[in-house]
């Protein structure tokens, strides 16, 4: 009788480890991060109700919101000044040296929200994030007619408080802003406990979808 190590060779049938799949939200954030440009759609100021699309370079802020560097002379900027509603279409980048395939088979993401010009302390952080993605923009970033804008995505959730029994979220959906409290499945007493419980809750939420 010969002993065979189970660590040698490929795993037996049915023993392959389960690889967790990313959620749709995680896939969307990844695609937005990988992208460098997209199609910005604004509402035309000259032709009321008609969409106006522009090729747009973008970066992301610390919360994953798109940052734009745009000129006051550009039509899309004038459109945003008249009506802040906009959307940004991002498609899966084609790797360098690869032939583009069927565009309808590629991943794509549309972010809808409202454009807002940045001011004060927000500008420095936006400038750093944008130039890290688009170094050539250093040639025009300080022109007087250019400003940083952010597309505030319509639906988002921010954790505003946490305690031993649960946490509170501020949720924005379109123009509606409301709060909700979510209870932990058990009491936590340390930061490590909180992290473990949050991971468990995330796993349960993924399993339910």
Image (cartoon, rainbow, N blue to C red):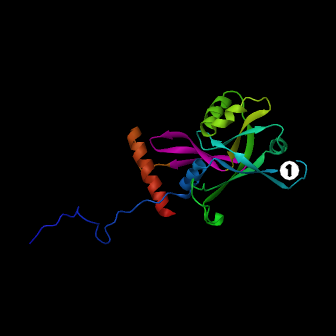
Q: Quick check: 110 above or below 196? A: below
State how many labels appear: 1
Q: Which residues are magenta?
A: 155-182
- Along the viewing direction, whichever of 206 and 184 lies nearer the viewer: 206
- Which residue is painted at 65% across and 34% down in the image? 126
Classify residue 118 by image quadrant. top right
Where residue 201 appears, x then y in whole percent?
45, 53
| Whole-percent x, y for residue 22 in the image | 49, 57
The N terminus lies in which quarter of the figure? bottom left
In the image, 164 versus 119, the foreground residue is 119
User: For residue 177: magenta?
Assistant: yes
Q: Is residue 77 left or right of residue 199?
A: right
Whether residue 76 is visible, yes or no, is yes
Could you tell me which secondary element the residue under label 1 belongs to? Answer: loop
- Is residue 175 visible in the rendered structure shown here? no
Task: Give the dominant element type of the magenta stretch: helix, strand or loop.
Answer: strand
Q: Position of residue 88 (x, y in %)?
A: 70, 51
Residue 59 versus residue 50: which sits nearer the camera?
A: 59
Q: Residue at x 57, y 55 (%)?
A: 97
Q: Quadrant of residue 58?
A: top right
Residue sitting nearer the eye, 126 or 192: 126
Q: Which residue is mark 1?
A: 44
Give the class, few, some or many, for how many residues have Cα within 10 Å of label 1's Cα (few <14, many ≥20): some
Residue sticking out furthest to the top: 120
Residue 66 within the segment the image draws in magenta = no
Q: Residue drawn 65% across and 63% down? A: 103
Judged from this view, the residue extending furthest toward the left is 1
Residue 146 % position (x, y): 76, 34
Residue 10 located left or right of residue 129: left
Q: Against 158, is 52 above or below? A: below
């Amino acid at each position: 009788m010969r002993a065979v190590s189970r660590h040698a060779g490929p795993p037996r049938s049915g023993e392959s480890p389960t690889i967790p799949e990313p959620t749709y939200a995680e896939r969307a954030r990844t695609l937005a991060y990988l992208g460098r440009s997209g199609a910005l759609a604004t509402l035309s100021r000259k032709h009321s109700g008609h969409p106006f699309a522009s090729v747009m370079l973008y970066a992301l802020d610390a919360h994953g919101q798109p940052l734009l560097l745009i000129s006051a002379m550009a039509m899309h900027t004038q459109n945003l000044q008249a009506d802040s509603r906009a959307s940004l279409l991002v498609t899966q980048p084609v790797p360098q040296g690869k032939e583009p395939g069927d565009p309808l088979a590629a991943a794509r993401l549309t972010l809808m929200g409202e454009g807002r010009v940045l001011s004060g302390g927000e500008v420095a952080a936006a400038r750093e994030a944008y130039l890290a993605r688009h170094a050539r923009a250093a040639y025009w970033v300080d022109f007087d007619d250019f400003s940083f804008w952010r597309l505030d995505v319509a639906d988002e959730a921010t954790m505003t408080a946490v305690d031993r029994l649960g946490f509170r979220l501020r949720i924005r959906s379109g123009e509606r802003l409301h709060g909700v409290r979510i209870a932990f499945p058990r009491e936590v007493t340390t930061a490590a406990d909180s992290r473990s419980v949050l991971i468990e809750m995330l796993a349960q939420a993924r399993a339910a979808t």
